[in-house]
Image: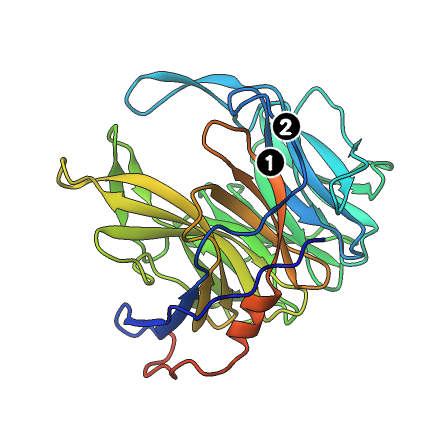
Amino acid sequence: MNRYWPLALPCLAALSLAPGYVHTAAEHVPGPAHVQQLTFDDQGPERVINEFAVADPTGRYFVLQHSEDPKLVVRQDGSQAVDFKETSNWDIVRANVDGSGRTQLTSDPSSEDQPTWSPDGSTIVYRKLNGKSFDLYLMDADGSHKRELLIDPLHDEKTPAFSRDGRRVVFFSDRDGIKWNLYSITLDSREVTRLTHEHFEDKHPQYLPDGRVVFHSNRGSRHVVLEGGEQFDLMNLWLLDPGNGQLTQLTTSDDLAHGDLVRDNRHAWVSPDGKYVAYHSNTIEADSHHPGVFRKKHRELCMTTVDGRHRVFLTRDDHRNFKHPTRSADSNGLFFVFKEQGHAWNAGFMDVTAALARLNLGRFAPPTMGLICFAE
């Protein structure tokens, strides 16, 4: 694969964040990101889409979800548009890490999506639309031996991910009447454990090697009003210790934003060594012509140390939009999806060795305050 181009002299910043939060040191990579494109769907964003490119632990493959079934949807302001929804007949595709050798692993008329790998690369956990609810399933790495993991016709289960020992799967669900809380299920007994309990949107959980869970949530976050009147909750990254219920906030919506920008931070993915968290950050700016109204501006890839203290913005100066970063088997690269203006979302890869070296330099100014922690 192409190696990531060296960082120029860093643009280093340290800002005081929310009371009780850390002073965060961050750098950004100047200029366009060096992206190795892995899929080449060119029918346009209203015809085809790829999401959630996830590499397997062996370093041989990645999987993604793919759809060519757009739906007519109604926007907040009442206008209509063609877009892809959860019901857009997604299927799961596997490819070699260089993008060659694509193989379709699912072909059910209903949607099958959000695949992730077991730690040994032998099994894929994913979700499937059964009637009106999404349930959790397992299949072997070649798409065979599909079997049920968790079936609940009254509720939805989303974004499943294995624990590092392969014995549990963490996910988020509305199964207790709250949209959304975190849960885990053991593979041997199928016992479900509820991990969060408040009326917040806790989503997209991932296990760290030590058993903690990183996720994004609107806990403690503000909301903004977007063009068309939509109320948009800003998300941020959090860490949960399931053993004692302690919660630690990793990002804030004002993290190193500037001017009239705020940030919406989502979809964390932990590196195999557990030291770093990759995520995407929506930059949202105030509308200068309409006080109190904001608009989505750009979606960037970011990495942070697992304590939230040091950060690298990987695509701040890139005009393309990026989302759903996941780590390569050796921790030195990111898989993701990205799009050019007017083009479909496609899978890509970026080497982040140089960015990791920056995070490891240890020359950031030490924080003057500790992380703010909450216990349930």
In this orientation, does residue 52 appear? yes
The residue to which callout 1 is attached is 346
**Which secondary structure, mark 1?**
strand
Q: Which of 352 and 309 is in front in this view?
A: 352
Q: Residues within 10 Å of mark 1 (few under 14, many from 20)?
A: many
Quick check: 250 left or right of 37? left
Would you place residue 356 above or below residue 264 in this image?
Answer: below
Q: How is the image coloured?
A: rainbow
The C terminus: image quadrant:
bottom left
User: Residue 203: where, in percent of width, then height?
Assistant: 50, 49
Determine whether label 1 and label 2 are within 8 Å by CB: yes
Image mark for residue 211 = none
Give the residue at x 81% y 58%. 120
Q: Which of 79 and 238 is in front in this view?
A: 79
Q: Say what amino acid the circle numbered 2 marks.
A: Asp
Quadrant of the image occupied by residue 233:
top left
Would you place residue 313 above or below residue 340 in this image?
Answer: below
Give the residue at x 86% y 37%. 145
Would you place residue 177 above or below residue 349 in this image?
Answer: above
Give the residue at x 45% y 54%. 31
Q: Say what amino acid the circle numbered 1 marks.
A: Asn
Quadrant of the image occupied by residue 79:
top left
Would you place residue 327 above or below residue 68 in this image?
Answer: below
Q: Nearer the viewer, residue 36 or 177?
A: 36
Quick check: 18 left or right of 87? left
For the residues marked 1 and 2, what is the alpha-carbon distance in whole angstroms? 7 Å
Q: Quick one: label 1 or label 2, which is nearer the N terminus?
A: 2
The residue to which callout 2 is attached is 41
Quick check: 208 left or right of 9? right
